[in-house]
Image (spheres, rainbow, N blue to C red):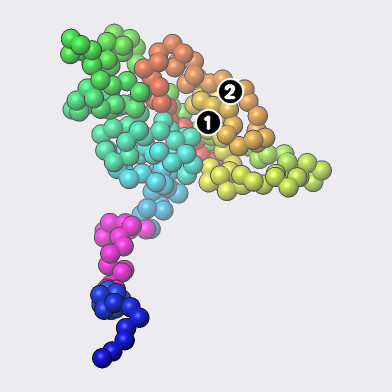
Amino acid sequence: GTCSLFPPPLVEVREKSSKMDWKSQIKPFPEDWDPVSWINNFADYHNPLFDLDHDKFSDVYTFRGSSWRGRDCDDLRDKVYPGRYNSTYSDNVDHNCNGIYGHAENGTSFEELLCSGTPYYGTAILGDSAAAHFHIPPQYVTASQITPTTFDNILNILENEFDWPEMSATTGFTNNLWEGHPRGPVSSTYLKVLERNRCTFRDFQNIGVNGA
């Protein structure tokens, strides 16, 4: 007879695994994906780098994403994005990402109950580095202010091109998420509009470009 340390089925699995074409099983991008066009769309047209449904809105904060335009609440549907006016979806879908969906007991949508009859204005700006709120943290260029944590958020800052659209005078909506570079408070046209009409939540776009 023979003596086996491991049962035969395990050996068979190993043999099959060694013959599998793992590359054919991993498909992070569509077959027709063009990396050059993907980069150009971001670099030349300043659209979000990560936008699965290609509606020009993203749920990624940097790389021209949700710090520049309202956050996409469903990046798998190209007809769901901030500021969308009309929709063919049911009332249970937040088609414009303002956080309002569903309907009352009488069947009237909450969007209609809360937002109809009021002026609906989004906020947008097209401009240069001033519009994008370009800022180099003084800690980066002042030797006496450099500490062990000064460059902790350098990748996030580079991904946003040394711009701070989330703190700009037009589309600002939050204090800085990265401690110390720069500080608030924030006041903007978008926040003033939102204060008067909550239905405009996330309806903003900043298309500022450094050197434009």
Q: Quarter holding the N terminus? A: bottom left
Horizontal and vertical percent for residue 178? Answer: 60, 37
Note whether 170 is above or below 11 in the view shown: above
Q: Name the residue rendered at 41%, 30% in the picture.
A: 70
Indicate yes or no whether the magenta region holds residue 128: no
Tell me whether the residue at label 1 lies in contact with that at label 2, contact meaning CB atoms closer than 8 angstroms.
yes
Alpha-carbon span between mark 1 and mark 2: 9 Å
Label 2 residue SS: loop
Q: Position of residue 12 (x, y in %)?
A: 25, 77
Image location (x, y in percent) of residue 200: 38, 19
On screen, residue 51 versus residue 209, left or right, reads left
- The residue depicted at 30 percent of the width and 60 percent of the height is 27
Magenta range: 16-35
30 vs 207, left or right, is left
For disc 1, the marked residue is 166
Residue under circle 2? Answer: 186
- Circle 1: residue type: Glu
Q: What amino acid is found at the position of numbered circle 2 in the picture?
A: Val
Q: Is residue 138 left or right of residue 104?
A: right
Up the image or down, 5 lies above or below 209; here it is: below
Residue 120 in sight in this render: yes
Which mark sits nearer the N-terminus, 1 or 2?
1
